[in-house]
Image (cartoon, grey):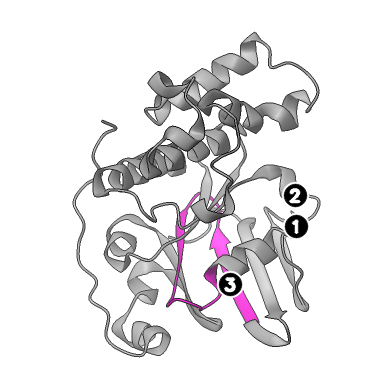
Amino acid sequence: MTPANDVLALEIDHLTVSYRDRPVLWDVDAHFPAGALSAIVGPNGSGKSTLLKAALGLVPADAGRVAILGGSSGSARSKVAYVPQRDAVDWDFPVTVREVVEMGRYRSVGWFRRVGRSQRAIVDDCLERVGMAPFAGRQIGQLSGGQRQRVFIARALAQQTELLVLDEPFAGVDARTEHAILGLLGELRDHGRSIVIVHHDLGTVRSTFDWVLVLNVRTVACGPIAETLTPENLRRAYGSDAVVAEEPEPAPWG
């Protein structure tokens, strides 16, 4: 897949990030087309999560430029919904499933205003789409790993942004939930949303995604799946051959 127009969902130029004087990302160039399901892959410690955080302004960069949907990362941040890794969330916080998803509407209604009827309808729809409507009143700490991921994806959907960015959304979830989430994200892509995901399963990337960045501190390759997820590029990133198997079709929510 190539961009449908000149505006990219996410564009990263010469991005360098370091922690305690140790480079985590070095002169990274990457771009992700609008209206595509894009993956970021690479070995552990390759800087995948840091790349997302730096692109969204959550960690400082030493150098480089980021554009989101054609605008600066600061001005366009309201067009992005971000789903962090599960270990970045306080699961003991006393909040219900519905309240978490309602947080996705605060940017529209304001933090100190009640969520009205029309906003509640959006929340209900998002809960239904991820199969979590029956758990709306449950405290998030009482949920399974897969259910928690569904809730935070529902919150991202409730933001109704043009770009969704997800950091390892399938870590610790069962295969059925992963397939169902991928099915939902594919539907969003088909309706014009742009999605960028840090992912580790090369087989799923091969069978489901449109675009991929292969990363190992530096950019190894970035482009359409067929041209980019090659044995040579995987050897350069992982240091050895990686088996890329076909995946079954996503299953419905259940």
Q: Which residue is mark 2?
A: 76
Magenta stretch in the rendered image: 26-48
Quadrant location, the N terminus? bottom left
The answer to whether any part of residue 85 appears in the image is no
* Above or below: residue 240 compared with residue 31: below
Q: Which mark is residue 180?
A: none
Dot 2: element: loop
Residue depicted at 63% across the width and 17% down the height: 119
> Distance between the Cα atoms at labels 2 and 1?
5 Å
Looking at the rendered structure, the kind of residue marked 1 is: Ser
In the rendered image, residue 43 lying in the magenta stretch gets the answer: yes
Q: Which residue is mark 1?
A: 73
* Above or below: residue 236 compared with residue 187: below
Q: Badge 1: few (under 14), some or many (20 or more) residues near its Cα, within 10 Å?
A: many
Residue depicted at 68% across the width and 12% down the height: 116
Residue depicted at 23% across the width and 39% down the height: 251
Q: Position of residue 135 (x, y in %)?
A: 42, 23
